[in-house]
Image: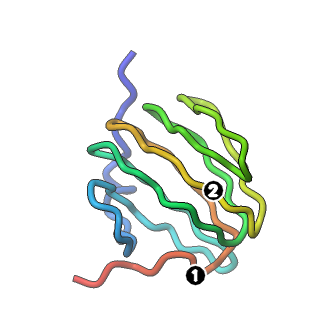
Amino acid sequence: MKIADFADFIKDLPEAEHSLDGLKTWLLQGETMQALFMEAVKEIQLPPHSHGAQWGIVVAGRLDLTIGGEARTYGPGESYSIPAGVEHFGTLHPGFRAIDCFADRDRYKPKTK
């Protein structure tokens, strides 16, 4: 079964500013939080980091994620929750797509062109 790409109206959202080569992102800004639609076009290593609470769901592909020292692989339809301040890191595999919600209203800034 082929998972459809994100809809055009999602891809019309502003891109998010970040430093990860090979990661496409679209930012939905709310008053109190953010949602990030993301797609990996190649393997991407996420370095260890922490921030406010985060919840995400895998739409397609695979994510290897270590949260607070506990490693797990996530696939389509599986969700993950990262408590505020907990260190996490991982690997996004090519074709990975997810929707992540961040409790931090300003976790990402819109990309400037």
- Counting from the top left corner in percent of width and height, residue 53 is at 73, 65
Q: Give the residue at the far front of this rendering.
A: 69
Q: Quadrant of the C terminus?
A: bottom left
The residue under the point 68% across, 61% down is 87
Identify which amino acid the numbered label 1 is placed on. Asp
Name the quadrant containing residue 95: top left
Identify which amino acid the numbered label 2 is placed on. His
- Residue situated in front as seen by the camera: 19 or 87: 87
Q: Quadrant of the N terminus?
A: top left
Q: Give the residue at the far right of this rendering.
A: 83
- Counting from the top left corner in percent of width and height, residue 73 is at 58, 32
Q: Residues within 10 Å of mark 2 (few under 14, many from 20)?
A: many
Q: Give the residue at the far left of this rendering.
A: 113
Going by the image, does 19 lie left or right of 74?
left
- Residue situated in front as seen by the camera: 3 or 78: 78
Mark 2 lies on a secondary structure that is: strand
The residue under the point 40% across, 79% down is 110
Q: Residues within 10 Å of mark 1 (few under 14, many from 20)?
A: some
18 relative to 24, above or below: below
The residue under the point 56% across, 61% down is 48
Mark 2 and mark 1: span between their CA atoms? Answer: 19 Å
- Counting from the top left corner in percent of width and height, residue 3 is at 39, 27
Q: What residue is disc 1 on?
A: 106
106 relative to 56, above or below: below
- Residue situated in front as seen by the camera: 9 or 68: 68
Q: Earlier in the sequence, mark 2 or mark 1?
A: 2
Q: How many numbered badges does the structure rendering display?
A: 2
Q: What residue is disc 2 on?
A: 88
Mark 1 lies on a secondary structure that is: loop
Going by the image, does 64 lie left or right of 10?
right
- Counting from the top left corner in percent of width and height, residue 92 is at 43, 44
Query: In the image, which is nearer the foreground, mark 2 or mark 1?
Result: 2
